[in-house]
Amino acid sequence: MNSKDASREILWAGGFLDVVRINRWEFVRRKNITGIVGIVPVTDDGKLVLLEQYRPPIGGKVIELPAGLVGDIPGKQAEPLEEAARRELYEETGYEADRMEVLFEGCVTPGLCDETITFFLATGLRKTAAGGGDETEDIVVHDIPLGAVMDFLGQQSRKGNLIDLKVYSALFFLQREIGEREEA
Amino acid sequence: MNSKDASREILWAGGFLDVVRINRWEFVRRKNITGIVGIVPVTDDGKLVLLEQYRPPIGGKVIELPAGLVGDIPGKQAEPLEEAARRELYEETGYEADRMEVLFEGCVTPGLCDETITFFLATGLRKTAAGGGDETEDIVVHDIPLGAVMDFLGQQSRKGNLIDLKVYSALFFLQREIGEREEA
C-alpha cells in the first residue's frame, strides 16, 4: 500500500465486488480471486477463436476473447494461471491446447478497478467438446481466419454488437509473432 | 433494457459509481457521464504521446493513453465527444491538435462495467502548455518515437509500472494506418 493510500476505506461489500475509497477516489475490487486470465487461441489453420456473449453490464452482446477469473472456485484457490487459462479455454470454446505461453499482460481500466489480466497464446488446438461456457453463460464460438478478423468485427459492429478492445491488443501481438516467425 | 435484465436493482449508490445487480450479476456503472474518450496523440515527427500516472486502484504507476470522462463537468453535460477529447488531451499533455478523427471504439471490461470508450487519433499537434492534468492528477508525459514504444514499455514493466492494454489496441490501429498510407 502506497503512503498516498493511507485513507483506504471499504464503502460497500458485495458478493463478488467491494467498493473501496482512497482519498476521494472510488473504485471496485473483485473479491476472492488471485488473478484474471485471457486466452488468444489460434488454430493450426490460422483461425482466431472469438466469443460472442451477452453481457449484463453492457445490456448487449460483446465480441471478445475467452477469459476468466482465477482462484474463485472453492477448493481451487491456488490454481496456477496457466491451468485456469486451459480450464476457461475448454469451458468456453471446447478447445484443448498443446502449447500455452504468456503473450502479454496489463491492466484494463486502472481508474476504476484493481484488475490486471494475463493473456496466454494457445496453439496446437484440438476441439474435444462443444464449448459454450458453464450453466450461467450463453456463448457462441466464432473461428475466424486471421486475415478476415477485421471484416468480421466490422460486421458485428454493424449488427450492434460491441467489440472488446482487448481483441485489438491481441491482434497487435499476433502480428508481431507472425512478423518475428517470418524473419526467423 | 433487455428482457433478461428485468431484475435490475441498485445495490449501492456512491458519489461517482453505482453498484447494480441483474439476476446474480454484480457490476458497476459510472454516474453522471455521457461517455468516455481516449486519445492516440501522434506528433508530426512520429512520436506517440503516453502518460505515466499513479492510479489509486492499482496502487502503482500505469503507462496509458490520455483519456477522460465526458459529461461529468457541471454546465458541460452536453459536451461532444471530440471536444472532450481535445480538452483531456490539452489538460493531460499540453498538446492541441489540428485534426481529431475517431480511430476505434469498444468496451474494456464488459463483465464488470457498462463503460465503452471512443478513441480519437490526434495529429497536427502543437505543444502550448505543460500538461500534467488537473489539481487531482499527477501525470508525467512521455513522447516516444513509434519505433521505440515497445522498448519503452518493456523498460517501464521492468521498473514495476503496469501497461494499460489499450496502449496495444492503439498500436494495432496505428500500424494499420501507417500500412494504409504507405499503400496509398
Image: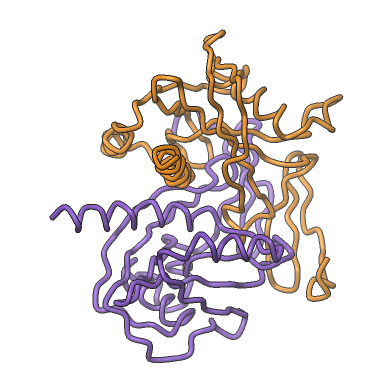
Chain colours: A purple, B orange
Write the residue at 29% across / 60% down: A102
> Where residue B48 appears, x then y in whole percent?
42, 28
The image shows residue B56 at horizontal and vertical percentages of: 53, 36
In the rendered image, the quadrant that contains the C terminus of chain A is: bottom left
**In this rendering, is residue B70 above or below A140?**
above
The picture places residue A18, in percent across and down from the top left corner, at 62, 54
The answer to whether B27 appears left or right of A5 in the picture is: right
Q: Nearer the viewer, residue B169 or A67?
A: B169
Q: What percent of the width, then of the height, locates residue B66?
A: 54, 30
Please give the name of the residue rendered at 58% of the width and 56% of the height, measured from the top-left corner. B109
Q: Is residue B142 above or below residue A70?
A: above
User: How many badges with numbers are in the image?
Assistant: 0
Image quadrant assignment for residue A99: bottom left
Q: Residue furthest bottom?
A: A129
Q: Nearer the viewer, residue A117 or A101?
A: A101
In the picture as drawn, the residue positioned furthest to the left comes out as A184
Q: Tell me where residue A40 sits by quadrant.
A: bottom left
- The residue nearer to you, when weighing A135 against B164, is B164
Q: Is residue B94 above or below residue A147?
A: above
Q: Residue at x 45, y 20 (%)?
A: B44
Placement of B74 over or under A33, stated as above or below: above
Image quarter (top left, top right, bottom left or bottom right) of the N terminus of chain A: top left
Locate residue A46 relative to residue B42 in the image: left or right. left
Nearest to the observer: residue B137 or residue B76:
B76
Is B28 on the left or on the right of A141, as rendered? right
